[in-house]
Image (cartoon, helix red, strand yellow):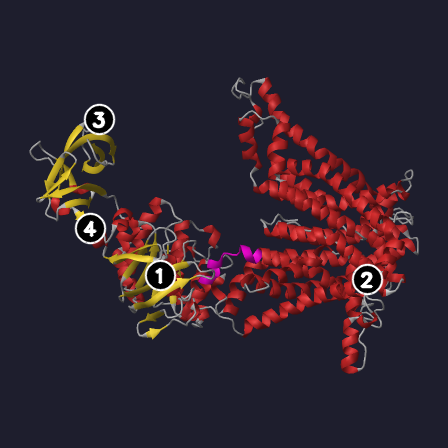
Amino acid sequence: MAVRPLESARMTDRFHLDAVPIRLDGCGKTFPGGARALEPLDLTIRGGETIVFLGPSGCGKTTTLRIIAGLESPDPGGRVLFGDEDVTDLPIERRNVGMVFQSYALFPNMTVAENVAYGLKVRRVGRAERGRRVEEMLDLMHLGEFAGRRIDQLSGGQRQRVALARALVVRPRVLLLDEPLTALDAKLRDSLRLEIDRLLRELGITAVYVTHDQGEAMALGDRIVVMAKGRVAQVGTPREIYYQPADGFVADFIGTMNRVGGTVRDGVLRIGRGSLPWSGPDGPVELLTRPEDIALASGEADAHLDGRIAAAVFLGDRTRLVVEPADGPPLTVDTAGRSDLGRGDRVSLRVDPARLLAVP
Amino acid sequence: MSACVQHGPGDLPRSAASPRAGRRRMGEPLRLAALLAPAAILFAAFFLLPLVRLIAIGAGGPQGWAAYLTTLADPGHLDSLASTLALSAGVTAVTLAVSTVAGLFLVRHRFPGHALLVALLTFPLAFPGVVIGFMVIMLAGRQGLIGTVTQALTGGKLVFAYSMAGLFLGYVYFSIPRVILTVMAAAEKLDPRLEEAARSLGASPWRVVADVILPALKPALISAGALCFATSMGAFGTAFTLATRINVLPMTIYTEFTLQANIAAAAALSVLLGLITWAALAVARSVAGTSVAAAG
Amino acid sequence: MTSLTHRRGWGFWLQLGFTLLVCALLTVPMAMSMLAGLTANYFVGLKSGLTLHWVEEVWRVYAGTILLSLQIAVACLAVTLVVGVPAAYALARRPGRLARLVEELLMMPVAIPGLATALALIVTYGAVGDLRSSWLFILVGHVLFTLPFMVRAVLAVMLSVDLTTLEEGAASLGAGFIRRFRTIVLPNARSGILAGSLMVLTLSVGEFNLTWLLHTPLTKTLPVGLADSYASLRIEIGSAYTLVFFLMIVPSLILLQGLARHGRPSA
């Protein structure tokens, strides 16, 4: 899957797609039986933007995608707009969307080329043009040599690329991807993720991507919608989500977060026996900080906290320490990879006060 | 599979050189063979042996094996074979069409009374042929529903139970529950994402059925169809109930055996019939790998 | 497949109508025959009144066939359990080409028309002792015909529960074969054994194709009696007799449908 950027950039030009914005207006979903899968949701997805819905299973992200696709209707009152067009009452087959499924959903009774051609056939595109467009798309996805293959003769990664080709060849207004990489192994997932990222940017299409994998979300999303229990917890760029989590759920769900509890008095936060400067109202407080924002102190004078190492995990580029202060919960601290520290060693820690977050 | 599953903690590690391990490894196949033996003996003594005998009797006359050809070449028998084949093919086509429409509908839609409808449609699954025959008489017999309705509407009484048409109706009646069950089981196993994918590419509901669902159901339909065909070929009870004059192969065999006492011809025709139904069901099994049964 | 349910166009109603029509085709004659069995005079119609007279008449004339059918069905169930369950186990533990072949062979009595099987039995064993005039002769036919259903139902469940691993687990805890079979194999195959048993009972009680040739005037089963009554007696008696037959098989059919809804062991 080595991509030759020049060639592919030239080819994607021809496929460049209109960037249609999407608006969800009060879209909720209650299933028969009364289960509320999605609280009413307002969201605007900009044209050409890649938006990622991220959350644990059952959070409502797939329901949202299926409402955008037209596979589910929102509860009465909800509206879905593609550009200026209200598509709420259009079934999926008339919305002109492209959809990629987790399980690929390739038609087993058709070859690779027939799968890709299917949407064009339904749209009554003439045989000659159909053939040309299918061939171009297969070339773009590096699937040319597999055109005549049956689906069960393909690997997982190849299948996913066929699914992408099939969704894109009809020039959809929106590309919808439902956990497209989940069924693949880790290494393939990384390379396909890069390929999808490149494709989405070159095509300039509006894309909605659903995943439970925060790595995928960070890498692909222009913006991420973090969801929990049928609600939107936060909408923001990957950096905003990571550095300014809107609440404790987002903070815990994205990356690793330390919780530091203590008491503020006169501009000083006391954490057990340690202390650091903190300007905030007096009283008990819980603050959050990332493992990379706690450093090993160079000396006693420098230190805010100290403790004993309970675990040291070598991760190559860094070493992750779990430090237990004399009192209080353990802290996760990232240090340089080349570290001699080990279990049982005493260390002093320094916390960057600017990186401490007070989160509701 | 290891035969060493019953090793105790003190046993030596498994080794091909150890005579003890060797004996153990032989143990399980022997035990499985012993468990299979009663069924095998029963089957051999009461099915295989009689079947071989039947085949031999078909060739037992002065003509020897040529008797099979003579029996087959008999115009009456040929006629009977042809009409049975035609009947079975027709029944299969109609049953498949009817059951596919109803079965797909029942899988794709949920509505109040759904479970009851499925239960009613699959209820006659295990009715014997004689009872099916009686149901046909109830519908299309002299005092049947169709006769009464047509008499009220047109003045003429439509009665067709005691003919090939009645038999046709009976076999369709018999086959519908089984084929509906097969269609429903296969349709429920379909990945709903396939249908959604086709729709996301713009396919209308009818197009989805034609391009995605029917191709996916093909193995199940072939299998169910073969089963339906075999059943219609070999069934006896319904025809016997409706009229002994209906010219189908099982009736011909029965007549040869009881009235003409022509055991050789009956045997030869039975062997032929058995070959046809067995071949049809072999097709069914090789396509679907599911259980098949010709009852009735 | 909730996807298509939220828009019910004319296609939905057309298909519903068709399905209801098919259902009517199947159920109306059943209802008619049950009613006819309880009507004083079917030719006159319901206004002649409802009566149990015909059912009593059936019992008076055909009680013997009903009892014999039950006797054969129970005996048939016993034999298929004793013979079929171990056979299914053997096939489940050795999935391979040989097992497939054996399975294929065991299914043959179902694939070959009952008429042919009955003829074969008669020409082979018809002259052996008193077998021809004994009910055991019919039992042999029924066992041949129903055994495949028992084996299939049990085998399907045994294959779906990964018996090998369960048994290896039990063996690792020190359980010998007999104990494993009793405490692991049989309980885990219970739903298949139950489905197979119901199927065997239902099929045996209704079997006609084989039985018609195998029976003698002294060994008439219920379906033989049914054919008899359809051919020679008034429609009310045939209907009442059919009603009795329905009453006998309905419980097991309902149980079978219930079983099928839970996990669907194929039968």
Q: Which residue is mark 1?
A: A39
User: Closer to the observer: label 1 or label 4?
Assistant: 1
Q: Which residue is mark 4?
A: A243
The mark closer to the camera, 1 or 3, is 1
Disc 2 chain ID: C
> Label 4 marks which chain's residue?
A
Q: Pointer 1 and pointer 3: residues touching (CB < 8 Å)?
A: no
Which secondary structure, mark 4?
A: helix
In the rendered structure, find residue A344 and report the number of the disc placed on it.
3
- Going by the numbered disc 2, the residue's amino acid type is Ser
Name the quadrant containing residue A276: top left
- Which of disc 3 and disc 1 is earlier in sequence? 1
User: Spatial distance from mark 4 to mark 2, Cα to Cα?
Assistant: 81 Å
Q: Give yes or no for residue A66 being in the magenta stretch.
A: no
Marks 4 and 2 belong to one chain: no
Task: Left or right? Give the position of A133 relative to A265.
Answer: right
Q: Give, as a three-letter code, the residue at label 3.
A: Gly
* Local crowd size for mark 4, using a 10 Å CA cut-off: few (<14), some (14–19), many (≥20): some
Per the image, the residue denoted by label 2 is: C239
Q: Which residues are magenta?
A: B186-196
Tag 4–tag 2 contact (CB < 8 Å): no
In this rendering, position of residue C133 left or right of residue C248: right
Question: Which mark is first along the chain, 4 or 1?
Answer: 1
Q: Using the numbered discs, state the Cα–Cα distance from disc 4 to disc 3 in whole angstroms.
A: 31 Å
Distance from disc 1 to disc 3, alpha carbons, whole Å, reads: 49 Å
Q: Are marks 1 and 4 on the same chain?
A: yes
Callout 3: chain: A
| Rendered location of residue C86, percent (x, y) | 68, 35
